[in-house]
Amino acid sequence: MQVEISEEAREAIEDLVREGDFSSASEAVDAAVALLVATRGGSWTALEASLDAARKDITEGRSLLLTPQSAGLLKRRIEREGHARLAAKKQV
């Protein structure tokens, strides 16, 4: 099969081969096609399931609205808990 590609795609493939990421242009194209096939299948299904679960949590009130103020509070809480865990590990 012969395929025409854009100049930008050709240059990108040449760069990948030149930099040693792939041993040939065919190998680079095969990897790109494999990635497209993989992301078209199960990965999207898992992402959609995660988004559905998140939407359900939001609908059922199990969520937190992040504003600049609440994000700051959350950051400080995470930092405090992280410091406390580190201190506890040092005592062991």
Image: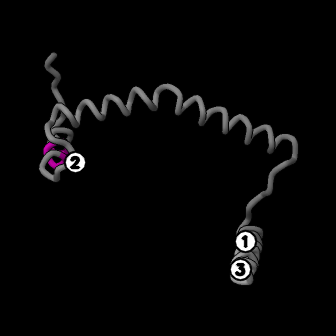
Where is residue 37 shown, x and y percent of the image?
Answer: 40, 26
Neighbor class of circle 3 (other Cα within 10 Å; few <14, some 14-19, many 20+) is few
In the picture provided, is 34 more to the left or to the right than 67? left
Residue depicted at 74% across the width and 37% down the height: 53
How many numbered badges does the structure rendering display?
A: 3
Where is residue 13 shown, x and y percent of the image?
Answer: 18, 41
Residue lying at the far right of the rendered structure: 61
Which quarter of the figure has residue 35?
top left
Instruction: Please name which of the two marks, 3 or 1, marks the residue nearer to the observer.
Output: 3
The range drawn in magenta is: 11-16
Does the magenta-highlighted stretch encompass residue 13? yes
- Mark 3 residue type: His
In the picture provided, is 43 more to the left or to the right than 52? left
Q: Earlier in the sequence, mark 1 or mark 2?
A: 2
Q: Report the front residue among 4 and 29.
A: 29
Residue depicted at 54% across the width and 31% down the height: 44
Numbered label attached to residue 83: 3
Numbered label attached to residue 78: 1
Where is residue 25 shown, x and y percent of the image?
Answer: 15, 36
Neighbor class of circle 2 (other Cα within 10 Å; few <14, some 14-19, many 20+) is few
Residue depicted at 81% across the width and 51% down the height: 63
Q: Main secondary structure of the magenta part?
A: helix
In the picture provided, is 27 more to the left or to the right than 89? left
Circle 2 residue: 21
Secondary structure under the numbered disc 2 in the rendered image? loop
